[in-house]
């Protein structure tokens, strides 16, 4: 059975609801931000029951955006995002599983009546072959995906297509499963572990190299949590490897630097995003308080100034003066300070 057939069988026939999953991948509704809960309340129960995601892929500032959801399944995230982009925006879902697409499409009219507009489409296709769907290059503000990239047999092809489809300054905001080490072949070849998003999970450092290889120079981790193996048999089969659900944001910005370089810049958040009135969370290490001067590296500056977030910030400084590596970024000067004095002898 091919990888595609394994995934289609698992998500089309074996799983009937999120309760059938054998890990704690699915997010608990109680852990979701308050602003998202009313949106989920507007989604058809059958769509919600077939949700197999592992994170939240609803970033802020989406009004009027054009969004692509890779591996959209029964359409839960599509219908949540449809409410965020509004009638002037559009959300397109891509999935390869007929049973999942059938649920998404069968409730489209129900959701249009609920929302007061119809701004979604669902396409059957493969994430590695997005060029076959007639999607225009540079036409999406945001691409999302929820626990699906790990299922792809060619992850390089997926990220290359995402880079091509995003507008300059656009964003790939997605959740997926990652491993603490490279997954052994026996786990990768196990159909059930693959279907549970474990067998195809990338070692976290391999993912970072992959992202940079495809032009996403500075991947930003937004949030993460360990996955619990709720089935004892599964726990035994994956012994020795830890798995995590993690959300990353990758910006389509050419010219980002490999490390966080300090140019003496800072930003001030205006507090104008309704979903984040007090703090703006760029990533796990950048929680920017409203009204407070917040020093940033050159890459973070560009992620705010050259994207849809620009109007929500004031910007202090420019790129005219370089001060070395940004303090606290995890990279330090390798040389001994103070010249030769105190240095170790040559070998």
Image: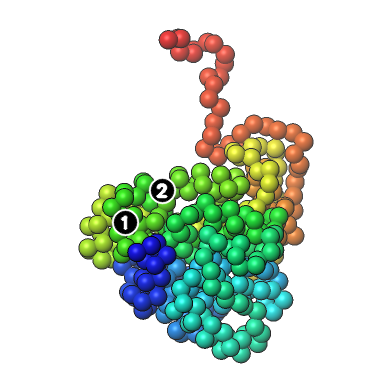
Q: Crowding at label 1, few (<14), some or many (≥20) Cα neighbours within 10 Å? A: few
Q: Which mark is residue 189?
A: 1
Image quarter of the C terminus: top left
- Identify whether 171 is placed above or below 298: below
The residue sitting at 69% across, 79% down in the picture is: 87
Q: Is residue 235 visible?
A: yes
Q: Crowding at label 2, few (<14), some or many (≥20) Cα neighbours within 10 Å? A: some
| In this rendering, position of residue 25 left or right of residue 328 | left
Instruction: Estimate the x, y position of residue 263 in percent, counting from the top left.
Output: 70, 37
| In this rendering, position of residue 268 left or right of residue 206 | right
* Residue denoted by label 2: 203
- Identify whether 217 is placed above or below 130: above
Q: Describe the element under mark 1 as helix, strand or loop.
A: loop
Observer-nearest of 129 and 72: 129
The residue sitting at 34% across, 64% down in the picture is: 1
Q: Quadrant of residue 177?
A: bottom left
Q: Is residue 36 visible?
A: no
Instruction: Estimate the x, y position of residue 77 in percent, counting from the top left.
Output: 53, 72
The residue sitting at 30% across, 59% down in the picture is: 190
Mark 2 or mark 1: whose residue is earlier in sequence? 1
Observer-nearest of 228 and 89: 89
- Identify whether 99 is placed above or below 154: below
User: Closer to the observer: label 2 or label 1?
Assistant: 1
Observer-nearest of 160 and 248: 160
The residue sitting at 44% across, 48% down in the picture is: 204
Are the two marked residues, 2 and 1, in contact with CB atoms closer than 8 angstroms? no
Report the colour scheme.
Answer: rainbow
């Amino acid at each position: 059975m091919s990888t595609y057939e394994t995934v289609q069988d698992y998500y089309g026939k074996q799983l009937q609801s999120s309760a059938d999953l054998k890990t704690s991948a699915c997010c608990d509704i109680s852990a979701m931000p308050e602003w998202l809960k009313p949106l989920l309340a507007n989604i058809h129960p059958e769509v919600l029951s077939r949700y197999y995601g592992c994170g939240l892929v609803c970033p802020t500032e989406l009004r009027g955006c054009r969004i692509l959801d890779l591996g959209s399944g029964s359409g839960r995230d599509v219908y949540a995002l449809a409410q965020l982009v509004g009638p002037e925006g559009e959300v397109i879902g891509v999935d390869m599983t007929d049973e999942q697409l059938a649920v998404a499409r069968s409730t489209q009219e129900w959701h249009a009546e609920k929302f007061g507009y119809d701004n979604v489409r669902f396409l059957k296709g493969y994430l590695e072959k997005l060029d076959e769907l007639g999607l225009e290059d540079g036409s999406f503000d945001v691409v999302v995906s929820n626990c699906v990239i790990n299922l792809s047999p060619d992850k390089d092809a997926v990220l290359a297509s995402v880079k091509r489809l995003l507008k300059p300054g656009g964003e790939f905001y997605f959740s997926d499963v990652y491993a603490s080490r490279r997954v052994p072949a026996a786990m990768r070849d196990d159909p059930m572990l693959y279907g549970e998003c474990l067998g195809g999970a990338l070692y976290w450092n391999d993912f970072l190299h992959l992202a940079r290889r495809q032009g996403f120079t500075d991947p930003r981790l937004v949030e993460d949590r360990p996955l619990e193996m709720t089935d004892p048999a599964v726990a035994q089969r994956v012994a020795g490897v830890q798995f995590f659900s993690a959300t990353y944001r990758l910006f389509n910005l050419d010219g980002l630097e490999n490390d966080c370089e300090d140019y003496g810049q800072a930003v001030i958040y205006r507090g104008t995003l309704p979903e984040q009135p007090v703090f703006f969370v760029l990533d796990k290490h950048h929680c920017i308080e409203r009204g407070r001067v917040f020093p940033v590296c050159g890459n973070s500056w560009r992620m705010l100034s050259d994207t849809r977030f620009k109007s929500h910030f004031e910007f202090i400084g420019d790129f005219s003066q370089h001060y070395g590596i940004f303090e606290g970024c995890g990279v330090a000067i390798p040389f001994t300070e103070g010249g030769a004095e105190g240095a170790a002898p040559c070998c």
